[in-house]
Image (cartoon, grey):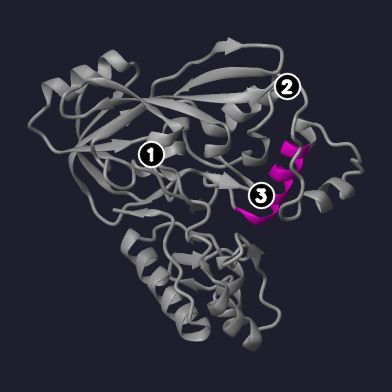
Amino acid sequence: MEIQHFFSLKNYNTFGIDAKAKEFVSVHSVEELKKVLKENASKEKFILGGGSNMLLTQDIDALVIHVAIKGIRIVEQDEDFVWIKANAGENWHEFVLHTIGHNFGGLENMSLIPGNVGTTPVQNIGAYGAEIKDTFVSCEAVNIATQETKVFTKEECNFGYRESVFKQELKGKYIINSVMFKLTKRHHKINVGYGDIQKELEKQGVTTPTLKDVSNAVIAIRQSKLPDPKELGNSGSFFKNPIISRDHFNKVHSKFPDMKFYEVSENEIKVPAGWLIEQAGFKGIRVGDAGVHKNQALVLVNYGNATGKEIVDLSKEIQKAVLDKFTIAIEAEVNII
């Protein structure tokens, strides 16, 4: 556990931005994490997980603590459910495949989302009709200032759409070291009603889908739309899908009757940001090494040597164009640093 100086973070963020950390250390246990925090109490700190939901626009003038704590274990189980705990440094997709391999249901719709387990509650990640909060039981986190460990219940996390208490009032105060999920062992709720899952299953000739079938369908859909960060720098969905009032939607929909949408509640409508961006003319556009992916307008990419600022500038141009055309504001889902 050695602190390194002026360390390149190029291989530690999925955008592949070559920003430098003033200091860098990787921790592999809760004990190591607490030791680093205690011995470097006076230093400014930056917590790094899988690097999948951030865009670095500058060097990090702080001690970067890379959380690489591994381990998966069953805490409790009965005939119907299993309570399974995964440590923060576990790769999310590999953990999902691990649960499916044991026939544990609940995470299959979130296959192939980039990043590590520890950051999933922060963002309340979700895909294809499922979110972390649906199976989340609790998470354990270390207080950065006191090094004390606290367990946060689902209620205490205050989950919202791509939101949690860790992005709001507790931002920068805790480091999540493990997450516990409650998954089904039988009577699985197979969720194929969102997006193109049913269509993909039909294409694969699947009529009675298993957990693995749903996962495979999601993987196939994501791979057809989303570039592999190892081959083309990106952070998955760059923007949140905006949720607008029904009145607002009705006004916009009357001008753009082909607009895609999903009903969230009686008074709220979710509009796919990718559709808005594509209609605004940005799908596949490239400015230097910054660009919008040719297959999915929701994904901004680094074609090689783009800076974080160049990607941010492109994102702001997209936001302005969408607002001007549709009177709908889209927000970045990615943390811009």
Q: Is residue 51 visible?
A: no
In the drawing, what numbered circle is on residue 88? none
The residue drawn where x is 57% and y is 32% is 135
The image shows residue 278 at horizontal and vertical percentages of 60, 74
Q: Which residue in the protein does label 2 denote? A: 103
Corner quadrant of residue 70: top left
* Extent of the magenta region: 214-226
Q: Is residue 224 left or right of residue 205?
A: left
User: CA gap, disc 1 to disc 3?
Assistant: 22 Å
Point out the frontmost of discs 1 and 3: 3
219 magenta-colored: yes
Q: Amino acid at mark 2?
A: Asn
Where does the image place residue 288, in percent across and percent down from the top left? 43, 70
> CA separation, marks 2 and 1?
32 Å
Percent position of residue 83, x then y: 57, 18
Q: Quadrant of residue 265?
A: bottom right
Which residue corresponds to the image point at 43% horizontal and 35% vertical from the top-left?
Answer: 155
Residue named by callout 1: 12
**Residue at mark 3:** 222
Vertical arrangement, residue 165 with respect to residue 251, above or below: above
227 left or right of 19 in image: right
Q: Is the stretch drawn in magenta largely helix, strand or loop?
A: helix
Secondary element at image label 2: loop
At 49% from the left and 60% from the top, the residue drawn is 240
